[in-house]
Amino acid sequence: MRISIDEVKRIYKPKVKPIEWRDNRLIILDQSKVPFETIYVELHTPQDVADAIRSMKVRGAPAIGITAAYGMLLSLLSSMSKVSDLNDALRVLENAKRIMDAARPTAVNLPWATGRMLNKAKSSISNGSVRSVKELVDALKAEADAVFNEEYDAEIAMGIYGMEKLNNGDSIMTQCNAGGLATGTGLGTALAPVKLAKLMGMEVSMFVPETRPWLQGARLTVYELVMEGIDTTLITDTAVGLVMYKGMVNHVMVGADRILKDGHVFNKVGTFKEAVIAHELGIPFYALAPSSTFDLTSDVNDVKIEERDPNEVRLIRGVPITLSDVKVYNPVFDVTPPRYVTAIITEKGIIYPPFDKNVNRVINGGGGYG
């Protein structure tokens, strides 16, 4: 019998809180310091939020979306002395959206969240449900809370669907960090089935590639899994193929920063490699993401893949590992074509091929299996 979302909420207690709204302050765990330091920082303005996203203090598509939603609220709270009416408030919100949307162009949750907050403000003003800036602040606080709560419910649902694919004794490979640190809730997307399987008494284990150049796998995913008591093995990115070839992995489960209507999956660079090898060896490859991560309008060639500072590759934690002037190509994401994806697991159900028919049906149809 499938466990319910409410039952999971009752018995699962996240081991870490990456994002917290407290006393009109947005407090985030600085993920660039994990696991060596546990430092929480306060964000006060949309520019603070954008800087935190760019500097990887907060990362992962859902966590970025939640942070940006609260960032829209911060834009009003930090401008109260300059905002005299609701028209001023809308201008502040529109500017905040522009500032934050530019921080990470590939992650679709970012403009989704800021757009949702801006639309909430516009609709609340136009329908007369808010008549003052203070009432608008209250409405946006409720909307940001809803973004967080809906994300957590979605992750639990994804975890329940994903757990159906696991058997006792299974070993799962992932990529980067798609756990609670990446989503802001403490549970995660790709790690949710594993955490819930452990919660339900199943014996499961994980293989975690290090994920150069920021080492999110080594620093963050290992940290989360060890805290949850899950058997975890760290491997180099270059060992992925051998581990799968030797039959040490039963499933690959990854997150996503954007999924298109035809099933193309944009995720941390290295995901495509895992998908191709898994496909060649007959290992199921699943992408797990909430419906907010789906982009049902763009073509694969429309999506800009973010490139970052070359020194992220030339250095490891500030220590040079190569020539200081060597040319570097440092894409943050790659794209996995749909033919390598066994299924996409969402809070609305499991989507199977053909994705060009089933993605839109499940995401907009409200549930079911594709």
Image: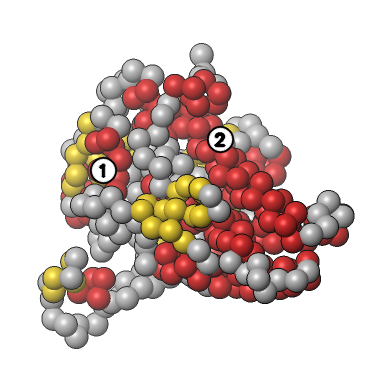
Q: Which residue is mark 1?
A: 223
- In the depicted view, which residue is nearer to us: 137 or 81? 81
- In the depicted view, which residue is nearer to us: 159 or 339? 159
Q: Residue sitting at 49 percent across and 55 percent down? A: 26
Identified by mark 1, the residue type is Tyr
Q: Residues within 10 Å of mark 1 (few under 14, many from 20)?
A: some
Identified by mark 2, the residue type is Asp
Q: Is residue 319 visible?
A: yes
Q: Is residue 53 above or below residue 263?
A: below
- In the depicted view, which residue is nearer to us: 242 or 259? 259
Q: CA distance from mark 2 to mark 1?
A: 23 Å
Q: Is residue 65 visible?
A: no
In the shown orientation, is residue 270 left or right of residue 13? Answer: left
Q: Residue sitting at 69 percent across and 61 percent down? A: 118
Q: Residues within 10 Å of mark 2 (few under 14, many from 20)?
A: some
- In the depicted view, which residue is nearer to us: 19 or 187? 19
Residue 153 image label: 2
Which residue is outermost to the bottom? 325
Q: Residue sitting at 18 percent across and 47 percent down? A: 235
Which sits earlier in the primary sequence, circle 2 or circle 1? 2
Element under disc 1: helix
Please state the horizontal and vertical placement of residue 45, each as a whole percent of the image.
Answer: 53, 67
Which residue is outermost to the right? 127
Which residue is outermost to the front? 81
Q: Residue sitting at 50 percent across and 26 percent down? A: 9
Element under disc 2: helix
